[in-house]
Image (tube, rainbow, N blue to C red):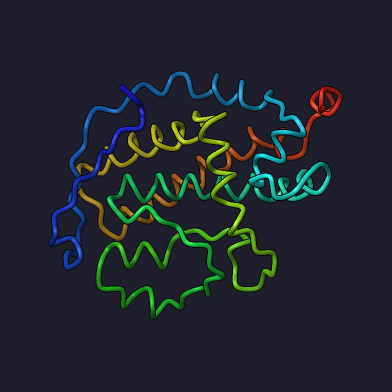
């Protein structure tokens, strides 16, 4: 059975509830995460891989340059999709340059999902002042990572399952804040492990074909 298990079942009344009720299942063991992160940090990409990540739109050095940004963003978005899934929210994370919400807008949110939408972490590339748009490249990049390195999504899922289970089946605003912190902590670990994929180690660059 896949370790990517859905932990959350919401009722139709979710949109009007102040607390999201979550049905949880047993979380898989997390003991292999450190080992998997180590394996991920030593992985290498070829020039052909770089081109596949961009959907074969770019080649050679141009693909490699774009991927230094694209892979980090894809790792971030995979995590947000998994976080939304565990919380029972819509999984789609559109590429938009969203404005930072005000405290009043956050306080006025009427549902837990709306509160989450306003609080969802934004990368610099998703921010309101960035002109570097990667939307059309995100889908092939995420597909590549899911095919070659499914452990990235699995690590997010395992950590989020464990974290949401500690909330005893209910997620309120405080619970959303907690889960966002768990996302940030997990992203930092995965981002560090995938640095070699983005920038290339000396060993990887020697093997590049």
Q: Which of 160 and 91 is in front in this view?
A: 91
Q: x and y percent of residue 50 in the render?
A: 72, 39
Q: x and y percent of residue 203 in the render?
A: 82, 23
Q: In which quarter of the image is residue 142?
A: top right
Q: x and y percent of residue 202 in the render?
A: 85, 27
Q: Which residue is drawn at 30% across and 49% down?
A: 87
Q: Residue at x 31, y 73 (%)?
A: 109
Q: Which of 46 and 159 is in front in this view?
A: 46
Q: Which of 110 and 199 is in front in this view?
A: 199
Placement of the C terminus among the 4 image quadrants:
top right
Q: In which quarter of the image is residue 166?
A: top left
Q: Which of 182 and 54 is in front in this view?
A: 54
Q: Which residue is drawn at 71% across and 46% down?
A: 67
Residue 167, placed above or below residue 18: above
Residue farthest to the front?
A: 56
Q: x and y percent of residue 182 in the render?
A: 44, 44
């Amino acid at each position: 059975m896949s370790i990517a298990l859905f932990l959350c079942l919401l009722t139709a009344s979710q949109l009007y509830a102040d607390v999201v009720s979550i049905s949880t299942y047993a979380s898989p063991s997390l003991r292999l995460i450190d080992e998997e992160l180590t394996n991920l940090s030593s992985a290498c990409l070829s020039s052909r891989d770089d081109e596949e990540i961009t959907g074969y739109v770019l080649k050679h050095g141009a693909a490699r340059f774009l991927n230094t940004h694209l892979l980090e963003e894809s790792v971030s978005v995979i995590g947000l999709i998994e976080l939304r899934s565990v919380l029972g929210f819509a999984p789609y994370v559109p590429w938009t340059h969203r404005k930072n919400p005000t405290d009043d807008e956050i306080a006025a949110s009427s549902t837990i999902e709306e509160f989450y939408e306003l609080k969802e972490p934004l990368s610099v590339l998703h921010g309101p002042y960035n002109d570097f748009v990667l939307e059309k490249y995100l889908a092939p990049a995420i597909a590549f990572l899911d095919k070659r390195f499914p452990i990235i999504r699995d690590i997010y899922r395992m950590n989020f399952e464990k974290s949401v289970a500690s909330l005893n089946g209910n997620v309120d605003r405080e619970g959303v804040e907690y889960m966002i912190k768990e996302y940030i902590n997990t992203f930092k670990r995965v981002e560090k492990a995938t640095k070699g994929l983005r920038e290339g180690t000396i060993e990887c660059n020697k093997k590049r074909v």
